[in-house]
Image: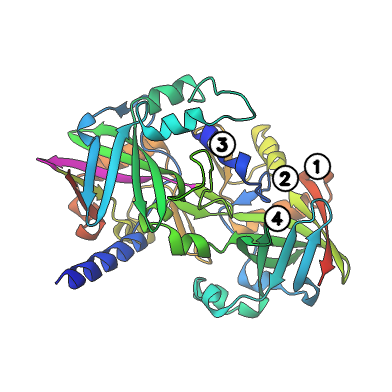
Amino acid sequence: MKKIIVTTILFSVVLCLVGCLTTLHPVFTGKDLITDPRLIGNWEKAKDKTKVIYRQPNANELNHLSPALQSEAGKIYMLDEKDERGDIRSTNYAFMLKLGKYYYMDYYPASEKERQSADNFFAAHYIPMHSIYRIEFKNSNSFNVQRLDGGYLEKLIKNKQIRIKHEVMEDGGIFVTAPTAELQQYLIKYSDVPEAYSNDDNYTKIK
Amino acid sequence: MNKKFFLVASVAAITFLSSCLTSLHNLVTYTTVISDDRITGNWQHDDMTMKIETVPTSTFLKNMTSTKANGEEKKSNYDSKEDSLLYSRSYIVDFAKNNYRYYMVCCLTRIGQDLYADMEPIIAEPVNKPTPSDIDDLFNGGKYITTHSIAKVIFRGNELELRILNGDFIKEQLKNGTAAVKYEKDDLFATTLITASSDELRQFLTRYGNDERLYSSKNTVTLKKI
């Protein structure tokens, strides 16, 4: 029944994070965070003209984070995704880090709309997940993001080709519970394996 | 006095969230689910009305079944035989608050002499949506995993008491290493999640389910039948 409910929901909304590697733990520690001033601004996805904004968090958005993260406030970005009408569809915290020779983004739901609207008990059942992407700037006006493919890791786990902490869900799906260090090892080890990535998206800076 | 009462109720509701600890896995499976239709009906909690129906007869399932996907009528409401066995004996909890209608699925099981409920969210949608088939889930804007809360269920006359596990107490026990239950904790994002399997959750409740410290008044909701 749950699958049908989820399927029904997905018909009416296009989630940008579907299929991405999602994890319970972040892929970074506070000391791993870095910044790139080129990221701030308005961007358009080449594929479907989706518009997104990278910006600095406001005080309220920072207040929802742990003291350890608040101390890294200057290294935290916010990602606003707009729908076709130009309204903000979702807001995520965006954390940038470098592992080996590549740069990565860890997106985490900011949940402002949910926090304001939802019943507290109901909302407590939704645990925000980290969605992992690789980012590469071509120049100051364009960058490319590649999604870490959750399906690829799932296949490695099911074929017993990797040892990474996880839970097997009721429907046979994999829920990655690996701690940060283990996730970073995975990213480094598979950084040059093309199958570990999917959904190449190019973004161009707009005014 | 009404204002005072409302303020106390609001504070209690906010505190309630902070002490809620949820489980990745479900407590109740198709082999352990039971029906107890005393739970069905309309219930009142403070100024909120809650409707509980069996899944097969619920308005929610009827609405979902009538929604067409890809232009095709759905053949079954369930994904598998196990799914069918579980959900055909379960309940839909439906309530409205802050202009949103919330739906949860509630599965019951008996452990020893006690009755327990496993509750999982399904969807939160605007009360005033343009058409019944429009779906605008409140939680569609980010990546979340839905988890389960567990409550001891006590029927007392026309009252239904849901004694939800006391997250504060369990977190304290986890921190001290004195609770034998598998979990994950992320300090950077202040996330704690029970990851024990259905069997392990059952064993935990068999052992500690009657320990009063597992429950608290702020985590107890009393519903009155209307």
Left or right of A198 in this view: B59 = left
Question: For the residue carrying disc 1, how many other residues have a C-alpha within 10 Å: few (<14), some (14-19), or many (20+)?
Answer: few
Question: For the residue carrying disc 2, how many other residues have a C-alpha within 10 Å: few (<14), some (14-19), or many (20+)?
Answer: many
Label of residue B46 in the image: none
Can residue A124 be seen at all in this image of the molecule?
no
- The region drawn magenta spans B146-158
Question: For the residue carrying disc 4, how many other residues have a C-alpha within 10 Å: few (<14), some (14-19), or many (20+)?
Answer: few
Real-space Cα separation, disc 3 to disc 2, in angstroms = 23 Å
* Place of residue B101 in the rendered image (x, y in percent of width and height, measured from the top left): 40, 48
Can residue B151 be seen at all in this image of the molecule?
yes
- Which sits earlier in the primary sequence, circle 1 or circle 4? 4
Q: Do tag 1 and tag 2 residues touch (Cβ < 8 Å)?
A: yes
Label of residue A195 in the image: 1
Q: What element does badge 3 sit on?
A: helix
Question: What residue is pinned by disc 2?
Answer: A149
Question: What residue is pinned by disc 3?
Answer: A8
Question: What residue is pinned by disc 4?
Answer: A84
